[in-house]
Image (tube, coloured by chain):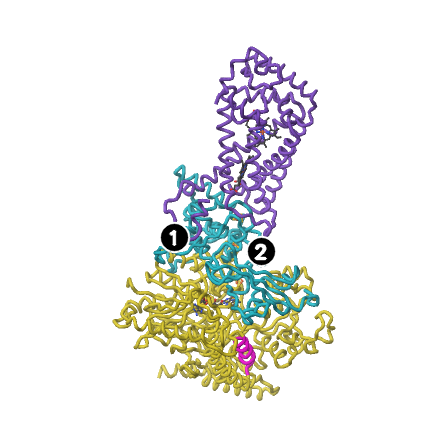
Chain colours: A yellow, B cyan, C purple
Amino acid sequence: MADKRVLVVGGGLGGLSATMKLAELGIKVDLMSLTPVKRSHSVCAQGGINSVNDATRQLGDNEYKHFDDTVYGGDFLNHQPPVYEMAMWAPKVIDLMDRLGVTFNRTQEGFLDRRRFGGTLYKRTAFAGATTGQQLLYALDEQVRRWEVEGLVKKHEMWDFLGPILNDNGQCVGAVAQDLFSMEIKSFKADAVVVASGGCGLIYGRSTMSMTCNGSAASRCMQAGAKYGNAEFIQVHPTAIPGADKLRLMSESARGEGGRVWVPRKPHDSRAPKEIPDSERYYFLEERYPEYGNLVPRDIATREIFDVCVNGGLSVEENRQCVYLDLTHIEASELNRKLGGILDIYRKFQGVDPCYTPMRIFPAVHYSMGGLWTNYDKKESGGLIAGSPKNQATSIPNLYAIGEVDYHYHGANRLGANSLLSCIFSGLFVAPGLETLLSNQGPGSVAAEQPQSLYDEAVKKQQERHESLLKQSGEENPYLIHQEMGALMTNAATVVRHNNQLEEAIGKLADLKARAWKCSLSDTGTWSNQNVLFTKAMQDMFPIAEAILKGALARDECRGAHYKPEFQLPGLTAEDPAEHRRQAEEWCDKFEQNIQKFLKTSVSTYDGKDVTISYEDVDTSIEPPRPRFYGLVGAEQISEVWQERKKKKKEAAQAAVTN
Amino acid sequence: MIAHANKPKTFFVKILRQDAPGKPSYWEKFELDYEPELNVISVLQKIAAKATTAGGQKTTPVCWDCGCLEEVCGACTMVINNKVRQSCSALVDKLLEDGREIELKPMSKFPVVRDLYVDRSRMFNALKKVKAWIPVDGYYDLGPGPKQSRGDQEMAYPLSECMTCGCCVEACPQYSKIELTPNVGETPEEFEDRKVDTFNRNFVGAAAISQVALFNLNPTGKMNAGERLDALTEEGGIQVCGNAQNCVAVCPKKIPLTMSIGRIGRAVTFNTLRKWFDRPAKKH
Amino acid sequence: MRRQARRWKGSVVSSAPSFLERHEFLLRRLHSLAGLVPVGAYMMVHLAVNASVFGSPRIFQRLVFHIHSLGPVLPLVEWTFIFLPIIFHGAFGLFITTGVKPNIEAYPYNSNLRYTLQRATGVIAFLFIFWHVFHMHGWFHNHFWVTYVAHPLMGAEFSPYNAGSSAALAMQASFLVPVLYTIGILAVVFHFSNGLFTLGITWGIWISPTAQERAKLLANVVFVIFAVAGMASIVGLYSMSQEKIAEVRAEEDEAYKVLVETGDIVPNPEKHSPLSEYAPGKHSDAEESDVEEGE
Ligand SMILES: Cc1cc2nc3c(=O)[nH]c(=O)nc-3n(C[C@H](O)[C@H](O)[C@H](O)COP(=O)(O)OP(=O)(O)OC[C@H]3O[C@@H](n4cnc5c(N)ncnc54)[C@H](O)[C@@H]3O)c2cc1C
Ligand code: HEM
Ligand code: HEM
Ligand code: SF4
Ligand code: SF4
Ligand code: FES
């Protein structure tokens, strides 16, 4: 297999773990990234990484429960076999990262310390200070550097992946990419290409993601024919610090310690917040949810903040949406003791001390559950067949996707601290499959046998696109189009979604798209031209943006991060027990109908002009779907009905077997 | 709260630009409308969108490097009002406290690619030179790593936050710029070799020394401590440090670099003496 | 400059590293060590001995006699343990200093100031010591050199067997002399005390920031002690009146006589002040013996 090579696009946790494992298997890797891999977006992750561990096991936890929390949290839209496999691997992944020198926090006896994260009852989350992602990424980066010295890995940093190269049989045999400095466009021959390009937050203008998370690589695969799954599922974090450049995460613990959320009753009141008397403040969470107050669950907080600003027009500022998160009623010394670390972020980036001035916060796009559609090879006993080349394969043969850009681990909603796990796991897991692929590759599909003209043609096509962009003249400014797209997407397809708004947004997006091809560049140079690179990435955002909007429009239900108030199953209203019971039955009927109709992966494809949505069944063979109730009135009754039905089904199934 | 009332309506940003390596550098001035809560990154974004100088002339967008915008990726280092720092955490409100103009320059210790974008490959090369990794047997499941005391973790953690931003070496008077260009008739590989050779023979800088301190603290990393220390006594090693301690003063992650330098200074002494007297490495 | 040539564009890299490159670590460590011993140690003793002149020229003379009791091997000792180490430390120090750009305006931190001063005072020390040894000691005690080169250039003014009196005259030769000495002493003493601080980091003696802060404090104390000692000898020598000098000289000659008789020191007219009664040409006993000092 000496001459076979794999091209890995992206050097975040996913790309690096794949690279390192491939190198261990003796496979040569070309590793491509927009930035030095050490600067990949994975550095931003703060919280931690989940796995079952010896301590939680003794409290009744096990891999199955981790699996179950993940699919329950994902509202059963996750394909279960890969999630099951991931949960089984999780403890091993953390052991490995520990061996690689990650500076995980320790207990006093020297074991890994764990904390509890949302969506589970167990302390599963290992963490390294407040920079777990950074520490994990560095450990992998170091291993890859080691392989680079050994000569198995060749890095191509500061290269932009422009798309896969397919041969006449539709197999991926390499990629075209462009050097960010010299602007040289070059083809890379590869017997398999692994895309690990992370999320696509930049489609929303500003998000909690890094500047490289523009989704361009995924879009370019989609444009080459790859399927894209569950595009409409975008996770929004309730409290982020809106900056002119980025929305930085503000931990929920600020509310946990007594932070109060409010807006002035008078829209865009220009007074300093402290001068606004209590009577003129609208503590909307406390008023709307007297029971929970400011501590309503994450998604509800997000929706209400959004609602107050977007629909209520009560944003603190006129030109920017935000609400106050107020801690000033608490003693500064106490705040600094309990929340010092996170308040420092606010001080550092806003130059304002939240102990004395209320913070301005707003929900922000945080994670994309959707991504390139990928396959898997399922084992009868649950889980996946290790070493199968089907695992993580996209719909284009020999093209693979892992990490955030792959769609199948997090369903409709990702649990905290599960993403780092899925990135490393999918990277480690894809490697043996690729080894099998490469050793079984028949004649005709090997990159070395492809005609050179195939590669030259691909380069030529990209060269043409590049040159026509430089020459293009028009009124439009790519940066402003991006801003408009961001605003459009943020308003229509984040927290609360309405069909009329989505329809309108699809129309507007089409207009914007037309304008995006009429940009004239302010830089037409041939050296390190960020202007043209940005414009390309911006143009390539449209297919994914369109997939998000169309997927959201077509999905008339509420599932995980996708929330459409019109289609929410209402709580039970009846007082009378019999009526109450009847309503619960009805609720469960509707729920089952909804599963029939919408418990499906949305699959977007792009034909060069438009995105088309189709649906595929979700593999729920391990744990059947059940309702999630967050603060739903009548949850107990519904749950009771549901359990009865479940029992009946089980009995029926058993009867069928014994007969 | 920073008072916005007494802020100017507009402010100026003076940028030292350079079109490509080897090209002359020149200043360009931009005028921007004042807004509260800007940072230098958002200023550059605005300049990119506008691409017009203060004099009203069309120009090219300024080229720069950034990533996380949270001061964890290390990409956005530049010299702002004569001091090296991360531009994402450089707040305009603070910078305008000393005047109406902000001055941006690329780092002076690295070759300029274009404008404010520099090539820091020498820093990544240093990580190779000092073998900054844990030499594990492999990535199969071999159980958990060695237990580590809380104290050791607390010592290691700050060191592991180094984001290779280069502030430390930019401010270090002992670290000099290396800018090479290919010779006529030199193949890209030969050029690359010459570059690596030159990098390896000049100061590694505080960040790499501190990484040695990190890996030599790790129970597994310790097993190869000698190799890393050897790398630091080669040409360009720790001995070049002149204890100016600027590194520690400018490090945005507040990494205790001079502590690492002291600790490694001691370790290399013992390591060298041990080798001199042909004694086996210390047992752990 | 060699480094500059290799670093800058175009030129070919010599693939065989030079001696300096191969042994950079060893040389730097030797340089650092030399700063402490013997050079630093010598300076401490030297300044302490010199300071004694402030209190009592007699003690000073006794200490100098003590040193000079080594007689003919003294030059060997001086060259091996003082001159050569200083020359090595100084020359290598200058080599380290060249090609480095200070950046104190941009980074005005305490340690950076110290770093910059360490180099600046190194250069001052180099000039000062070069001149000072010439001024007092003369560098060589060859008769021709002393008579025709050193003396006319105001060098070799010190006469060990008339230590206090000749040093005082040397110090009073011009108002510039004490001024230059003050600058030189402060520079060297700062250089040494801060050198102690950095040496502790270089060799890993003080590691934690707290330890380094304390070491800095210690270095400052060392600075004060030796700066005071240095100033004391300058003041002591500069303020000595002509009558006092004559008196001291007489005492020195007296002591000399006794010590020669007991055989503790070797007679050597070159080591007397020209004003001494034992000066060359004045006293017949010692006339023939300038051979020993020939270098
Ligand atoms: C603020 C924040 C906090 C988070 N905290 C947590 C947490 O606590 N726990 C958790 O589990 N998850 C967390 N996440 C999510 C998690 O960090 C990401 O999902 C994960 O890091 C993604 O890793 P990745 O390997 O898929 O991609 P990334 O790390 O995003 O890397 C993408 C790579 O692809 C490259 N690339 C992209 N496009 C191209 C192109 N066109 N050409 C070439 N290369 C390209 C990039 O250069 C980069 O190297 C957090 C996310 C954010 C934003
Ligand atoms: C108050 C300040 C000083 C005074 C009065 C002084 C005086 C003298 C005298 C009188 C001599 C001649 C000794 C001899 O020839 O036997 C001498 C020599 C010398 N001094 Fe100083 N000195 C002073 C400071 C320094 C300092 C700071 C240094 C730096 C380390 C220094 C280095 C030397 C050296 C190297 C010699 C020659 C070696 C020797 O003769 O033993 N002196 N000094
Ligand atoms: C003759 C001229 C001198 C020059 C040019 C010179 C130069 C230098 C320089 C550049 C350094 C810094 C070395 C480094 O950072 O690696 C240094 C360090 C030092 N010097 Fe000197 N020096 C001179 C004389 C002296 C004298 C006379 C003394 C003692 C009294 C002395 C004692 C020291 C000490 C103790 C150090 C610290 C070494 C370390 O940090 O490891 N130097 N010198
Ligand atoms: S040590 Fe600090 S300044 Fe230096 S590269 Fe690392 S983070 Fe940046
Ligand atoms: S202490 Fe050393 S590495 Fe740090 S700035 Fe000073 S000379 Fe450079
Ligand atoms: S952009 Fe990452 S450190 Fe500033």
Callout 2 environment at 10 Å: few (<14), some (14 to 19), or many (20+)? some
Instruction: Indicate left or right for B1 with A447 as reference.
Output: right
Pinpoint the chain carrying mark 1.
Answer: B
Judging depth in this view, the residue of C182 and A386 nearest the camera is C182
Q: Which mark is residue B194?
A: 1
**Mark 2, secondary structure of its residue:** strand
Magenta segment, principal secondary structure? helix
Span shown in magenta: A480-497
The residue that disc 2 covers is: B83
Are marks 1 and 2 in one subunit?
yes
Residue A133 in sight from this viewpoint: no
Asked if the stretch drawn in magenta spans residue C164, the answer is: no
Q: Which three-letter amino acid code belongs to the residue tagged 1?
A: Arg
Residue A124 in sight from this viewpoint: yes
Q: Assign ligand 2 to one image quadrant.
A: top right
- Residue A308 in the image: state x and y as whole percent: 63, 78
